[in-house]
């Protein structure tokens, strides 16, 4: 069904076929296009090219003609169950194997490339040089369009992911006691995800005097800083269940009741996001949701006392969610502002602000749009 949908979208766009290109490895960036079409995820991490031995290791490609079967190219032909929904071919040199397959099954002409951000420039140049009759055209919009409305099965996985995210953040909060470190808080969240069979994607965590930053500046997103009673601690956590993401953020005060200034900060981010959630209903426009969030935020006690802080999300109030962070971007203006919300969409609404003299706070919820209104799939624990 998914491959048939993509063939239809490709034909409508005037393509002879499409190539979906994805990166796997230990992080979950840029896996969605191949996974959506075949159910295959490449766990081999990226390693630099070694001419004559391998090229584009840690990546995978699907070649899908508009009138023929799909072929999955990957560096290793041995896979566990469930097997991908396409014929599998092992190819140590993924780039030349892709060129060979394109010549074999897709006539010269325009070919849509989905997953452009994961395609390195040297590989793109190689494909162009050996495929003079095929015009590779960036076509990421086809992938977004195919994944915009989730099926009932996908929505079930989104709900499972949201529930796991809530459990992971709850575990982090239990671990966040005076004397514990940011690393110990992060470990509690990751352990909960892995124990349940989910996949950890990433996080930003910060606390105390650094709570206005997103995360530590080193390779790990957490530090060994010990928490003190009264510290703000904020965490933005993302992971997945069978590839479908949760993405939620919470902020709380460690081991103490919030001060007046901390309460104003926490209320502002939470109440503005929740106001926008109420408008996530079929027929509404994305820009209306963003404007509602902004109006409530501007009327908050925090803004009344401290003025309007700079947005740390480029003015956006959230984004689509599924196999990746996806369009539409929830903003009052721009490309997606006029997009009409439909049942079956899933969005993450969020706000992150920082005032170095006070601290920083995050609040984010994941929401499924239903015919009867918004369904929050990352609720506060009961």
Image (spheres, rainbow, N blue to C red):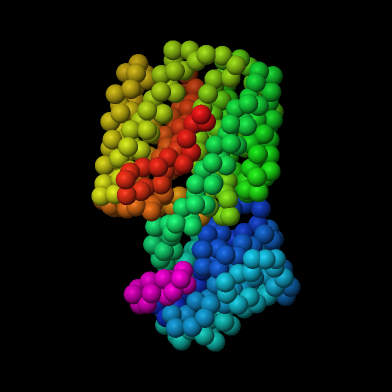
Tally of numbered discs: 0
In the displayed orientation, state which residue is furthest to the right. 53
Query: For this rendering, which residue is in front, 37 or 159?
Result: 159
Q: Position of residue 379 (x, y in %)?
A: 47, 35
Is residue 331 at all visible to an observer of this figure?
Answer: no
Asked if residue 8 lies in the magenta stretch, the reply is yes
Q: Position of residue 349 (x, y in %)?
A: 41, 40
Locate residue 86: give its quadrant. bottom right
Going 54% across and 41% down the picture, which residue do you hit? 163
Query: For this rendering, which residue is in front, 248 or 212?
Result: 248
Q: Is residue 53 left or right of residue 133?
A: right
Is residue 90 at all visible to an observer of this figure?
Answer: yes
Q: Is residue 123 above or below residue 335?
A: below
Going 54% across and 57% down the picture, which residue do you hit? 30
Going 36% across and 48% down the picture, which residue do you hit? 370
Secondary structure that dominates the magenta span: helix
Q: Is residue 260 above or below residue 241?
A: above
Going 33% across and 33% down the picture, which residue do you hit? 275
Query: For this rendering, which residue is in front, 210 or 146?
Result: 146
Q: Position of residue 320 (x, y in %)?
A: 41, 49
Q: Position of residue 367 (x, y in %)?
A: 42, 43
Asked if residue 327 lies in the magenta stretch, the reply is no
- Give the extent of the magenta segment: 1-14
Q: Is residue 313 left or right of residue 82?
A: left
């Amino acid at each position: 069904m998914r491959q048939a949908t993509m063939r239809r979208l490709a034909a409508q766009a005037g393509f002879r076929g499409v190539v979906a290109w994805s990166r796997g490895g230990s992080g979950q960036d840029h896996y969605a296009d191949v996974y959506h079409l075949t159910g295959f995820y490449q766990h081999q991490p990226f390693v630099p090219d070694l001419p004559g031995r391998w090229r584009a290791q840690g990546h995978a490609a699907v070649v899908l003609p508009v009138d023929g079967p799909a072929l999955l190219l990957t560096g290793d032909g041995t896979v566990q169950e469930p097997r991908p929904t396409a014929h599998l071919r092992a190819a140590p040199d993924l780039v030349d194997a892709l060129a060979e397959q394109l010549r074999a099954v897709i006539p010269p002409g325009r070919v849509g490339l989905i997953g452009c951000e994961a395609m390195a420039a040297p590989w793109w140049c190689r494909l162009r040089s050996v495929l003079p009759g095929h015009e590779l055209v960036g076509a990421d919009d086809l992938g977004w369009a195919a994944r915009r409305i989730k099926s009932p099965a996908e929505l079930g996985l989104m709900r499972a992911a949201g529930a796991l995210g809530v459990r992971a953040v709850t575990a982090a909060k239990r671990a966040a006691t005076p004397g514990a470190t940011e690393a110990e808080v992060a470990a509690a969240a990751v352990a909960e995800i892995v124990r349940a069979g989910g996949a950890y994607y990433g996080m930003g965590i910060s606390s105390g005097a650094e709570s206005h930053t997103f995360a530590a500046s080193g390779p790990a997103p957490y530090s060994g800083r010990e928490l003190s009673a009264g510290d703000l601690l904020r965490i933005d956590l993302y992971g997945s269940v069978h590839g479908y993401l949760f993405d939620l953020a919470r902020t709380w005060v460690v081991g103490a009741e919030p001060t007046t200034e901390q309460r104003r900060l926490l209320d502002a981010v939470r109440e503005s996001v929740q106001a926008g959630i109420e408008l996530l209903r079929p027929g509404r426009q994305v820009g209306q949701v963003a404007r509602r969030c902004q109006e409530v935020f501007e009327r908050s006690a925090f803004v009344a006392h401290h003025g309007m802080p700079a947005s740390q999300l480029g003015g956006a109030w959230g984004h689509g969610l599924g196999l990746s962070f996806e369009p539409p971007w929830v903003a009052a203006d721009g490309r997606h502002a006029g997009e009409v919300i439909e049942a079956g969409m899933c969005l993450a609404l969020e706000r992150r602000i920082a005032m170095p003299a006070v601290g920083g706070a995050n609040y984010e919820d994941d929401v499924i749009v239903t015919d009867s209104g918004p369904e929050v799939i990352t609720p506060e624990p009961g």
